Image: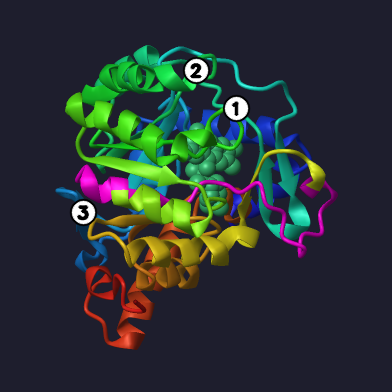
Amino acid sequence: MDLYDAAKPLLFRLPPETAHGIVHGGLAAVQDTPVASALAQRYAVDDDRLAVTAFGERFPNPVGVAAGFDKNAEAPGALASLGFGHVEVGGVTAEPQDGNPRPRMFRLGDDEALVNRMGLNNEGAAVVGERLAATDVGVPLGVNVAKTERVDGGDAPADYREAYEQVADGGDFFVVNVSCPNSKGFRELQNRDSMEAILGELVDAGASPLLVKLSPDLPEPAVADALEVVNDLDLDGVVATNTTTDRPASLRSPEAAEDGGLSGEPIENEATRMVQFVAERVDVPVIGVGGVSSAEGTYRKIRAGASLVQLYTGLVYEGPTLAREINEGLVDLLAEDGVDSVEDAVGADL
Ligand SMILES: Cc1cc2nc3c(=O)[nH]c(=O)nc-3n(C[C@H](O)[C@H](O)[C@H](O)COP(=O)(O)O)c2cc1C
């Protein structure tokens, strides 16, 4: 039996944020130790068919860790040793902030989902930037940059720039988060004028490769507007999607009533639809996120137009073998379809 199968019932008896802290702390503790090398030998799937080149970076496989799992960049190397092909750390803000009061993360056990209203708790870009400077991950590292909660919308461009400049040397790509449902005045930043101002400021600061992460709750015309900004400013990619404030009727867990963003299995199909909507409208790589927990689901997002995928909630429910399972499964799915590589499968359903 896998170690996580044994640990999961115990972890699931703890409040979700406590359980996350234990797993995350364990990962941070083994980073840069022989344990991490041993994990890498066990979990990394080394197969050229899985490799993807996107925005000038070579990813050894398409499966990455989504933002929020390692907010302060304490364990990116350990996550890479679990077989992930990239890690997105953050969100980080220019100033350190505590986030919302606990409890702020809820397990929807019957739905393989989470609801969170963390509120962008993080140690601040200066601390994260210093940590990244001392970190060698071995796979591309993305940094998710967000707005400090107390900063008003009009000052948002300068605030994003300040955060970016402190992590600039530590990231291989940068994701602008304008889609967090849990921080005041945040998702309003997705209107065309705000996006132009924020993203324009970051382009001006030299942020590259620069991607933007969108909410699944944006109506289609607003997504289309946002994508015009992506095209106009020559951004390097789009991350689709963040969590949703929507609550599908299928949810069975009482925790569904909690305020916050829903992630996991119930958002999978909607996220895949949004990947397709985005991929039809931009020529740059799309990172597909939302409810990924299997090779089949990963393959669906890739065929819908995602060059890379990310996951968070799947890791909670499936455990640390997930990247390996997905990568091994992808090789089989490619072979079944007679497709030579992941890159050849990107957008096959478009
Ligand atoms: C507890 C938690 C914290 C998160 N924090 C962030 C964040 O700081 N920035 C961000 O862009 N997304 C954040 N996310 C969203 C994830 O990156 C991802 O977009 C979302 O959870 C959907 O993927 P999943 O279904 O695989 O979890 C967070 C998600 C969770 C569950």
Q: Which of the numbered marks, if any, corresponds to residue 200?
A: none
Mark nearest the camera among 3 and 2 is: 2
Image quarter of the N terminus: bottom right
Mark 3 → mark 1, Cα distance in angstroms: 30 Å
Mark 3 → mark 2, Cα distance in angstroms: 34 Å
Cβ of mark 2 under 8 A from ligand 1: no
Residue type at the position of mark 1:
Gly
In the rendered structure, which disc, 2 or 1, sits on the residue that comes first in sequence?
1
In the rendered structure, which disc, 3 or 1, sits on the residue that comes first in sequence?
3
Q: Which of the numbered marks, if any, corresponds to residue 54?
A: 3
In this view, the residue farthest toward the left is 56
Horizontal placement of 189 versus 237: left or right? Answer: right
In the rendered structure, which disc, 3 or 2, sits on the residue that comes first in sequence?
3
Q: Which residues are magenta?
A: 229-256
On the image, the x and y values in percent for residue 88 come to 38, 39
Give SS at disc 2. loop
Tell me if residue 337 comes above or below residue 327 in the rendering: below
Reading the image, the residue beneath label 2 is: 152
Reading the image, the residue beneath label 1 is: 119
Image quarter of the C terminus: bottom left
On the image, the x and y values in percent for residue 24 come to 53, 33
